[in-house]
Amino acid sequence: MERFKISENTAEKIIKTLNFSKLNGLIAVIAQDIKTNKVVMSAFANEEAIKMTLTTGYAHYWSRSRNILWKKGETSGHLQIVKEVYIDCDQDAILLKIDQITAACHTGYFSCFFRRIIDDKLEIVGKKVFEPK
């Protein structure tokens, strides 16, 4: 399956349909690995991040803590190659079906959702795929 990519003009039309007002200029983004169907991370995006994602085919997000636009994997090489894009019914969240390179989580796990509440405790259910530096 090819990398998802659309023109700037089409991206701008789609962005105009999205509701960025609920989260002060941001929308929620869920990244799901297309091969495993695992949700690998959730993040936020502003209009610029969505435009970059739609026009380049690589996942871009807005960092609320650093207050910057970032391309997932730009420094680590753990890119998210966008394959499909879905918009929810309220038009305030996006699902990216991606090809995750190496891992999504900076802690070394494939998915950021590697802990599960089981009975009365939190257990690690994922496997580390790399050791962070």
Image (cartoon, rainbow, N blue to C red):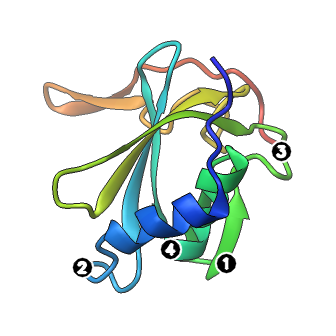
Is residue 116 found left or right of 67 in the rendered image? Answer: left
Do the CB atoms of the residues marked 3 and 2 lie less than 8 Å apart? no
Name the disc covering residue 42, or none.
Answer: none
**Neighbour class for label 2 at 10 Å: few (<14), some, many (≥20)?**
few
The number of numbered discs placed on residues in the rendered structure image is 4
- Residue 1: give x, y in percent of width and height: 63, 17
- The kind of residue on which mark 3 rests is Ser
First in sequence, mark 1 or 3: give its number.
Answer: 1
Q: Which callout, 2 or 1, points at the residue further toward the start of the chain? A: 2
Residue type (three-letter) at the residue carrying disc 4: Asn
Whole-number angstrom distance, CA of label 3 to CA of label 4: 22 Å
* Mark 1 or mark 4, earlier in chain: 4
The CA span between labels 1 and 3 is 17 Å
**x, y percentage for residue 65?**
57, 77
Label 3 sits on residue: 76
Outermost residue toward the front in this view: 9
Near mark 3 (Cα within 10 A), the count class, few <14, some 14-19 or many ≥20, is few
Question: Residue at left 34%, top 77%?
Answer: 20
Q: Which mark is residue 46?
A: 4
For the residue pair 106 and 17, the one nearer the viewer reads as: 17
Q: Secondary structure at mark 3?
A: loop
For the residues labelled 1 and 4, the Cα–Cα distance comes to 10 Å
Left or right: 53 as drawn, with respect to 38: right
Q: Quadrant of the C terminus?
A: top right
Residue 47 horizontal side relative to residue 56, left or right: left
Disc nearest the viewer among 2 and 1: 2
Q: Are marks 1 and 3 in contact (CB under 8 Å)?
A: no
Tag 2's secondary structure?
loop
Residue indicated by mark 1: 68
Which image quadrant for residue 2?
Answer: top right
Residues at marks 2 and 1, CA–CA distance in whole angstroms: 19 Å
